[in-house]
Structures are given as C-alpha cells and as structure tokens.
Image (cartoon, rainbow, N blue to C red):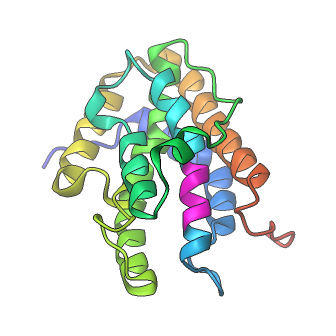
C-alpha cells in the first residue's frame, strides 16, 4: 500500500493539533447528561455551520462530499419540520475559501471529522439508540465509502503544491476556530478546561 503521508498532511496535522484537541474536549457527546434533546441541539448547530460551508466549497468539492443533506435528514428524523430547519440560524463567519489551497485546508477538517464520526456513530447507537435512519446519518455520512473517500482526499493533498502549504494550514486552523466559536454561540459546547 502506498504511503499517503504527504508533507501537506503532516503540516495540517501538526498545525491543527492544538485547536483540534481543544474542540474535541469541548464536544459533549460523551458528557454526563447528554441526551436526545441535547443531541438534537448539537445537530441543529452543526447544520448551521455545514450548510453555508457546503455552499462556500462549491467548485472545490463534488456534491457527494456535502454534509448538510445528511444533517437535514437527521433533523427530519429528530422531528423537525422543513420550515423549522429552514428557520435555523446559519453561521455568518466562515473560513476564507478563495483558492484550492484554502479549500484543501477547510476540507481537511471536514473530511477528518468523517473518520471520527465512525466512533461517534457506534457510541450514539449505544447511548441514544439512534442510527442512520433515526438521527445519526451525519455521523456516517459516507457510509461504506468512508475509507475510499478519505484515501482519495489524501491523494489530493499529496498532489497539492508545497508552495501553498501555509495557506492550507491557516485555513484549517480558521475552520476549527470558526466552528468552535459558532458552537459556543449556540450554547452546545462544554466549558473549556483551563488546565489544558
């Protein structure tokens, strides 16, 4: 199997390590008292971020990588009507996406989260009794194509220009920061741990 650890992938991993870890520790999926209403509020907030971001990434990724349709499916399964979903707030502050390099940085965060979704999918099935048909489609957004989609994205990173690496890393960091700020504004995150 070919090594897909490209210089850009390594730079993205290293550059986003701190903000990735910080956000991960504030997500409430495994916190005490996390129940179905809390999950629904979290999915509403995820929709508010991913819907405008999908639109901003048009031209840089195919429709098959869009995340908002799965979130809409989940919200319907969690008893929100179409007009309720349409009325949900959308994140006004997104990372800048004006080049392939920026798009790759943003997509690194989104595509990486699909791998983490596999863990969350199993945990939410156990904890909340939900699956792809009852509110957790987003957690398994690519289904059996998850691995193949990740490998295809790694190949795209491997083919990217090294000269624009810093732009990609900056865009990835901005994605984590925008996402965390948005989820914070929606009141769905745990309080930050000052000892980290």
Q: Quadrant of the C terminus?
A: bottom right
Q: Relative to the observer, which residue lies in front, 70 or 61?
A: 70
Farthest-out residue, left: 1
Residue 67, percent across and down?
A: 40, 42
Is residue 162 located in the magenta-colored stretch of the structure? no
The chief SS type of the magenta part is: helix
Q: Is residue 45 visible?
A: yes
Span shown in magenta: 40-46
Q: Is residue 10 visible?
A: no
Q: Judge whether 185 appears above or below 116 on screen.
A: above
Relative placement, left or right, of 81 versus 20 is left
Q: Judge whether 165 appears above or below 33 on screen.
A: above
Is residue 41 located in the magenta-colored stretch of the structure? yes
Q: Relative to the observer, which residue lies in front, 25 or 92?
A: 92
Residue 144, percent across and down?
A: 16, 56
At horizontal 26% and vertical 34% (from top left) the residue drawn is 64
At horizontal 71% and vertical 30% (from top left) the residue drawn is 93
Q: Relative to the observer, which residue lies in front, 69 or 117?
A: 69
Residue 118, percent across and down?
A: 34, 65
Q: Judge whether 134 appears above or below 109 on screen.
A: below
Q: Relative to the observer, which residue lies in front, 161 or 21?
A: 21
At horizontal 18% and vertical 50% (from top left) the residue drawn is 145
Relative placement, left or right, of 172 versus 191 is left
At horizontal 66% and vertical 40% (from top left) the residue drawn is 89
Farthest-out residue, right: 194
What is the quadrant of residue 54 in the picture?
top left
Q: How many marks?
A: 0
What is the quadrant of residue 131 in the picture?
bottom left
Residue 182, percent across and down?
A: 71, 45
């Amino acid at each position: 199997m070919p090594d897909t650890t490209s210089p850009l992938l390594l730079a993205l991993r290293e550059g986003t390590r701190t903000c990735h870890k910080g956000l991960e520790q504030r997500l409430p999926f495994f916190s005490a008292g996390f129940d179905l209403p809390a999950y629904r509020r979290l999915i509403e907030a995820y929709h508010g971020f991913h819907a405008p971001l999908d639109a901003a990434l048009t031209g840089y990724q195919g429709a098959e990588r869009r995340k908002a349709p799965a979130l809409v499916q989940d919200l319907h399964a969690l008893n929100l009507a179409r007009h309720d979903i349409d009325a949900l707030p959308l994140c006004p502050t997104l990372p800048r996406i004006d080049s392939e390099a920026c798009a790759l940085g943003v997509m690194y965060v989104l595509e990486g989260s699909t791998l983490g979704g596999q863990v969350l999918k199993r945990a939410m099935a156990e904890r909340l009794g939900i699956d792809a048909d009852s509110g957790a489609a987003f957690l398994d957004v690519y289904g059996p194509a998850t691995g193949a989609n990740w490998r295809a994205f790694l190949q795209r990173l491997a083919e990217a220009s090294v000269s624009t690496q810093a732009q990609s890393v900056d865009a990835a960091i901005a994605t984590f920061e925008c996402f965390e700020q948005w989820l914070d504004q929606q009141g769905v995150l745990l309080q930050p741990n000052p000892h980290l």
